Image (cartoon, rainbow, N blue to C red):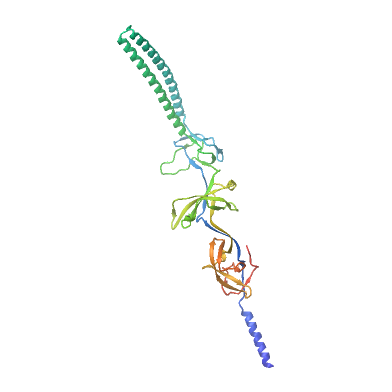
Amino acid sequence: MRYVILLLVSIGLLSGAWWLTRPKPITVTLHTVARGAVRTTVSNTRVGTVEACHRARMSPSVPGQVAVLPVREGQQVDAGTVLMEIWNEDFKAELRHTEAEIGTAARRVEEMCTQSAGAQREAQRLQRMGKQRLISEDALDVANTRAAAAQSACGVARANVEVAREARGVVAAQIDKTRLRAPFAGIVAKLNAKLGEFITPSPTGILTLPAVDLIDMHCLYVSAPIDEVDAPRIKPGLPVCVSLDAFADKRCEAVVRRVAPYVLDREKQARTVEVEVAFTDDKNLVGLLPGYSADIEVLLETQTDVLRVPTEAVLKGNRVLVYLPASGRLEERQFKPGLANWEYTQVRDGLAEGTPIVLSVGRDGVQAGAVVRPDTAPTTP
C-alpha cells in the first residue's frame, strides 16, 4: 500500500512539473483559405504628379514696362484673351504713320491710273489718225510712249500701296509681340508681374519666373515613374487605379495613355520609365489640382473565383503555416502559387479551401511545431 501511495505521489509531482514547465500556447491570428479574385498589378517606384494637359508658363518676347494687365490670378480666360501688354505707344504711332502712307499711296494710285487711262485714250485716237495719215509717225510714237509710261507709273503706284501695307503688317506684328495672349482657354494660376514694372525675357539658357502661368483645368492626367523591370508589361489602354494623398478614396476610372519610349536615370541605380495615366470619367477630375502627389496601380491581369491566400501569410519558398485544431500545433506546408500582388496570392495546388492558416507569421515563436491558440475564429474574406 505504501508503494502505491509513493507511486501516486510521484506521478502527481511529475504531472505538476510538466504542467508548470509546459510550453505556453502562442496567440496567433488565423485566416481561412477561400476563393476570390487575384489581380497582378504594377505600381510606381517614386511618387507621381497630377499634370495639366495644357499648361503655359509665358513671358512677353520683348522687354518693356507693363502698361496693361487686365487679368487677375484665378481668373478664367478664353483663348486669345490679352493677358498683358508692354508699353508700345511708339509702335502705335508708327502704325498710324504707315496707315496714313497707305491712304496717300492709294490716292496716288487713283491719280496715276487716271492719267494712264487718259494717255491710253489719246494714243488710240492718234493711232486712228495715223492710219488716215493725218499725223506724223513721230507724233504717234510720242503718244504711245507717254501711254506706256503712264501705265507703268500706275503699276508703280499700286506696288507702293502694297509696300505700305506690308510695312503696316510689320509694325502690327511688332505691336502684337508686346501683347501676351492666352494660347488656350484656362485659369490664370500665377502672375509674376505688376502694372508699371519693367520685365525682360529669359536669357538663353537661364530660366526665370514666367510672367503668367496659365493652366487648362479641364484636362488633367497623372505622370508617374515605373521601374524599368516592370515597364515592358505596361501597354496603353490598361486599367489603372490612382491614389492621391489629398483624398481617401482611389480613383479607378483611368487607363494608361502613354508609356515613354526612353528610360530616365536621374538617380543612381534607379532607372525608370515615365507612364502617363488619363481619367476616363470627368467626375474623377473634381477637386484635382495640378501638382498633387499621386500613386498609380496598373492592372496587368485578373483571375476571378480562384483559391487564394493573403500575401502577408506567405513565407519564403511559397510556404504557409497551417493550424491543426486537433493538436493545437502549426504545420508548415508548401503550395504552388499563381498570380500575386501585395494583397493576395493565388493557390494553384497544395492547399484546400477552408484550411486555417496563420496570418501573424511575424510574431515571436510562430513556427512549424509551435503550440498556438487562435485569438479569434479564422477570418474569411
Closer-to-camera residue (205/323)? 323
User: Would residue 372 appear left or right of 266 to someone viewing this image?
Assistant: right
| Residue 168: image location, x then y, percent | 44, 27
| Residue 282: image location, x then y, percent | 58, 46
**288 vs 8: above or below:** above
Residue 311 appears in the rendering: no
Residue 34 appears in the rendering: yes
**98 vs 270: above or below:** above
User: Would residue 210 appear left or right of 125 to someone viewing this image?
Assistant: right
Locate the C terminus and report the quarter of the image it occupies: bottom right
| Residue 253: image location, x then y, percent | 57, 50
Residue at (46% x, 53% y) in the render? 273
| Residue 291: image location, x then y, percent | 53, 48
Closer-to-camera residue (144/15)? 144
User: Would residue 56 appear left or right of 24 to someone viewing this image?
Assistant: left
Closer-to-camera residue (143/192)? 143
Locate the N terminus and report the quarter of the image it occupies: bottom right
User: Within the image, what quadrant is residue 325 found in?
Assistant: bottom right
**145 vs 355: above or below:** above
Name the residue furthest right. 1
User: Within the image, what quadrant is residue 205 found in?
Assistant: top left
